[in-house]
Image (cartoon, helix red, strand yellow):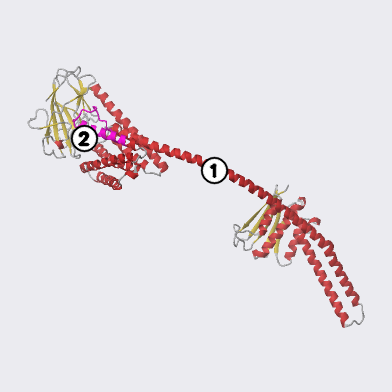
Amino acid sequence: MVDLSAQTLGQEELLEIPNSWRFYWQQYLFLGDSFAGGEPIGATLPWTTIPNKESGHPAHGFGTYALILKLPKRTEPNLALKMRRVKTAYALYIDEVLVGHTGNLANYPRPLTPPINKSGIVNIQVPIEKSEITILIHVSSMKYYRGGLDQPPQLSYVDTANASKMRDILWPAFIAGALLFMGFYHLALWIKRKTSVTSLLFSVFSVAVGTRVFFTYKLAYLMFPNLTEDTMLWCETVLAYTALPFLHLFISSSFPLDANKYITRLSWVTWVAMMIVSFGTSLYTMSRALPVFEIYFIVILFHMLYMGFVAIRRQREGAVIFTIGFIIAIFAGIHDVLFYNGTIPGLGRAIFPFGVLIFVYAQFLLHSMRFSRAYRELEILTNTLELQVQERTKELSAAHQESKKAHEETKHLSNAITNLLEDERKSIARELHDDFGQSLRAAGHFAEAISRSLNKIEQPTDELKKSIANADQIASVLIDMYHKNRDLLRRLRPEIIDTLGLESAIEELLANYRRNDFKIDFKCDANVSSLGNKEKITIYRILQEAITNILKYADTKAFTVLLTETNEQIVFAVADNGKGFDVTTARGVGLISMRERMADIGGSIEVLSAPSAGTKIIAKFPKN
């Protein structure tokens, strides 16, 4: 019996019912049954750790917590019992009345009808004149090896209990939301960068802890009211099995030079093993692995502390922030363990989630510092590169100007050479025509005249006949030289361009090759009469060079010549069906000469060819 009759229940007070309960193993007792026997037990302890016994009861089973409570003074009959940290199915009776239950109780002798209670607040109506009630809590755990109540219920008015429950929801919801936000934020960082696994490990740890808070503090019932108690316990346990290994892996990744690679591998092995147990076995087997996991927890705890202090001694960046946050989280966890066991009153509530939040924010600050440093270094590097780029750009610009100037000078020189060459050809052609050509013509006539004079002599001697033959031969040679001189004149300076025009000059040039069995198609639909002398000579020279290349390399006697025009351009093309060549490797002087000639009149030239595909040369220049 617990006597609170001397106390007064305040409007804002949550009165904790003292730990003076009796526990009846494998019995569901109701009011009117015999309560003889039973075992004294604090309601803060699971039944697997009965005080004053060598060992507790088995993990599987059921029982009854019983307590007679003399009520405190109160001002209204509307009271509430706040159930806290119940990790088992239960049914709560006040005297003979079922006021709340959750879960499925094994071997239960009565039907369980509403009210189903998942919020943890059980409303009870107790007349003011009633001074005593009997509280019976039937519990059953067939799947979780730590059955029973972790904390005793609290007595208060209904409004006070609801307000307290709202506070209990708001703080964990805020903490869970903050942890999930940071977890998904670092997951986004990892997806964006994928250069370091640290962000991913921190993300998994934060999401696991934040989600576990939802299940530990029953927030998941608000979003998923049909969740069973077994599912809640399974999620809470598997998230614990995930959070701790990834916390250790994250810290090992943050301080890789201070971590022990074998213990780091142990975390990976432990996490994989726990996932196999969680997804491949029952909830009971999974929960039975908790003692093994607690040993791992102790090893990892000391290793993480070791890494923190070693990192501080070696002056690692962020080591102090990490260690302070980690120590705060450890003390918060120790506080909650002692608080739930009733060893210390503590701060009156669980603070471990706050400790974890402080630790996570410390790691967030650590990462922010590292990102800030990396950003500063990147900014300095960017500025340095920009200066180098600017300097290099200036150098390249100056080199470009020099190259452009040299190109212009080369172009000017090439044009001068081409003009000088044409002038020299013109001068040579004039001399060959006016002097050498006329001399050859005159000498030929003289040789013919001598031959005719000698042929008039009657009865010529053998010597005379020989002289006549020599004179005829000299005349023939001189006439042949005269014709060759004419051909040379046409190559040096086609007079027909000046007399009959470009089209006739091309026709005459092609006629010479047709006489040697070449099949040549020539089409001219351009008005070439308006072209300047320089443009005409350029077209003629390009045709000569193209024919020379066909004779040397194409291995064909068929080609096509086209001279046409568009609205703005004159287009000149020569195409053959010969062997062709790779234009990317062609470096012939003839092609260079063609391009320089076209550039001199403001035009361009394009060479299209491929092995076994023939060759096509297209020259274009503006009409004006």
Residue at the image point whose x is 24% and y is 41% from the top:
298
Q: Which residue is mark 2?
A: 87
Q: CA distance from mark 1 to mark 2?
A: 67 Å
**Label 1 CA crowd tier, 10 Å (few <14, some 14–19, many 20+):** few
Q: Depth check: give the residue in front, 577 or 465.
A: 465
**Label 2 CA crowd tier, 10 Å (few <14, some 14–19, many 20+):** many
Image quadrant in which you'd find residue 139:
top left
**Mark positioned earlier in the residue sequence (1 or 2):** 2
Q: Position of residue 115 (x, y in %)?
A: 21, 28
Q: Secondary structure at mark 1?
A: helix
Judged by its main secondary structure, the magenta piece is helix
Image quadrant in which you'd find residue 395:
top right
Looking at the image, which residue sits at the far front? 313
Q: Position of residue 232 (x, y in %)?
A: 25, 36
In the image, 244: left or right of 414? left
* Residue 66 located within the stretch drawn in magenta: no
* Residue 325 located within the stretch drawn in magenta: yes
Does the image show residue 587? yes
Q: Depth check: give the residue in front, 413 or 293.
A: 413
Residue at the image point whose x is 90% and y is 77% from the top:
454
Is 563 drawn above or below residue 242 in the view shown? below
Q: Which residue is mark 1?
A: 389
Q: Amino acid at mark 1?
A: Val
Image quadrant in which you'd find residue 421:
bottom right
In the image, 423: left or right of 381? right
Q: Secondary structure at mark 2?
A: loop
Query: Is label 1 or label 2 in front?
Result: 1
Q: Depth check: give the residue in front, 216 or 198.
A: 198
Q: Which residues are magenta?
A: 323-352
